[in-house]
Amino acid sequence: MRGDPGWCSPPGENRDGCDAHMILREAPPTSGLRPKWSDLIGAFRGPSNLEERIAEFLDVPEVQLECSGTASLVIAFEYLKTLSRRRKVVIAGYTCPLVVLAAEQAGLRIAVCDTVRGGFDLDLTHLGKQLDDETLCVVPTHYGGALTDVDRVRCFIQAASREIFVIEDAAQSFGAKYNGRPVGTAGHIGIFSFAAGKGFTLYEGGCLYGETPEIRRGLRETSTRLRNHKRLLELRRSLELLAYHFLYNPLCLSFVYGGPRRYWLKRNDPIRAIGDYFTGPIPLHKVGSWRRKVGCQALSRLRDHLDRTRDRFDALSDQLERACPEISTHSPAEGYQPTGSFVFVTFTSGKACDEALRVLWSLGSGVSRLFACAIDEYPYLSGRITSTTTNASDLARRTLIISTSEMMEERQLGAIYRAIRS
């Protein structure tokens, strides 16, 4: 185990002052790269070649910067449509609703592939039933606390049909590695998100990577065709990035993040509490020069941040397994190196998970669900998806995430251990 186990040693059982203290010191649900004012100051005289810096970070020839990870996905779908008459996309059963909205905006029909029992990889038996002459692409998903085996999925698909593409959804996993190779480079197309909380951020942003020069050229041409010149939206994003530097601290997060979450929980709306309610259309516009420059400054600090985050991830996973052997923390397989921005914790039952969340969601404990439910169970997506899931539904009901943010305090970790043990 790497890291200092003392970072997550279970503290004493004294609860005096714990609730009020934690509500006023909110921990974010993921370990994002903490913004620094020097990033904003350095941007006035710094470089703006963010695409080149990202490509160098990933050790790839080039990448394509876009205004969000979801916009990147729309562009990928629209590009693949120019290569084929197929119009069905197969997505993971445990994934973000934005994937559905992106496919819908591109005019694609959506089918869902179940996950393996108790895990996040696609169930190849179920995937085989979804592949047909209408299938354009499959979208396996990585997570901040776990990676999926894209090579296995791609080999399976190629055995069935070479006309089906693989889009690697690495929105949560910029900087993760699989057998020494950057995540997002194993599919025909890889997409990343630079939204708030996902490590390196522009507040909103994303990028695309294409496997071949032909794909990369096609993605750029598609982006040029689809982009709108929304300068007011870019101004808004710039102001939001500025506000992010003011508000990304334990005290302010208790109001701008924890407050709305507790508001929706009181109204029995966990989907909005988690932040899983989205509407379209998805905007596509150019990222401005100032945000690119801020991004260049922040990216220079990312490797050190990821090293520290993974140390906390290893330490927290190890301590949870020792203290609560009944739960599963989904330790990475050999060769897998996720970003470690949170730890997945799967309980033996959905009831046990709900009871832990009932306690912890009322506090600023850095605990949440990644997704409210399996993708085919969101009420507002009803009628947009064909096929249903069993394993992904069970996994979503029994799983929560625990932040590895440096803002996590001993009192918060103590509340987490007590809730899980009880």
Image: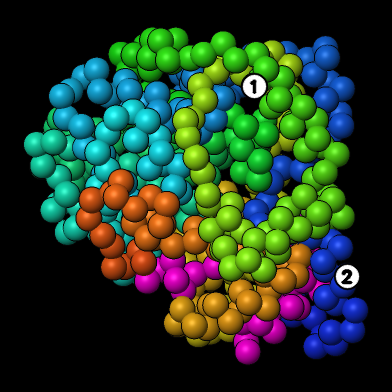
Element at label 2: helix
- The disc label shown at residue 50, or none: none
Task: Please state the extent of the stretch shown in magenta in the rendering.
Answer: 394-422
Is the residue marked by circle 2 packed among few (<14), some (14-19), or many (20+) residues within 10 Å?
some
Quadrant where the C terminus sits is bottom right
Q: Nearer the viewer, residue 54 or 79?
A: 79
Element at label 1: helix
Tell me the amino acid under the disc marked 2: His
Looking at the rendered image, the disc whose residue lies closer to the viewer, 1 or 2, is 1
Q: Could you say where residue 62 lies in the image, as x and y percent from the top left?
A: 48, 18
Residue at position x 56%, y 40% from top? 175
Residue at position x 71%, y 55% from top? 260
Q: Which residue is the site of mark 2?
A: 21
Q: Is residue 300 visible?
A: no
Q: Could you say where residue 67 lies in the image, as x and y percent from the top left?
A: 56, 25
Q: Is residue 20 left or right of residue 85?
A: right
- The disc label shown at residue 233, or none: 1
Q: Is residue 49 visible?
A: yes
